[in-house]
Image (cartoon, grey):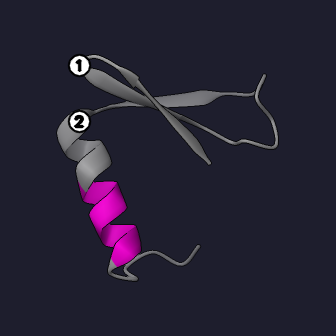
Amino acid sequence: MEMAALLPAIAIRDSKDPAGPRLVVGAATARALIDGIKQGRHDL
């Protein structure tokens, strides 16, 4: 997974498929995702 700042949003993509689809979310949503990953709330 790769993330890039596209102020005021964050773009997320699969690092193994850089030409593939991207998910663009707001900064608060990106922060919630990162916090959830760190806390083990997502089965990755």
Circle 2 — which element? helix
Crowd around label 1: few <14 · some 14–19 · many ≥20 (10 Å): few
Above or below, comparing residue 29 to residue 4 in the picture: below
Magenta part, dominant SS: helix
Q: Is residue 32 left or right of residue 15?
A: left
Q: Earlier in the sequence, mark 2 or mark 1?
A: 1
Residue in view at x 62 percent, y 48 percent = 1
- The amino acid marked with disc number 2 is Ala
Q: Report the residue marked by disc 1.
A: 8
Numbered circles on residues, count: 2
**Residue reaching furthest to the top:** 7
Crowd around label 2: few <14 · some 14–19 · many ≥20 (10 Å): some
Q: In this view, does 31 lie to the left or right of 6?
A: left
Q: Over which residues does the magenta segment extend?
A: 32-38
Corner quadrant of residue 36: bottom left
Q: Report the residue marked by disc 2.
A: 27
Above or below, comparing residue 10 to residue 39 in the picture: above
Instruction: Please give the label number shown on residue 23.
Output: none
**Quarter of the image where the C terminus is located:** bottom right
**Residue reaching furthest to the left:** 28
Q: Are marks 2 and 1 in contact (CB under 8 Å)?
A: yes
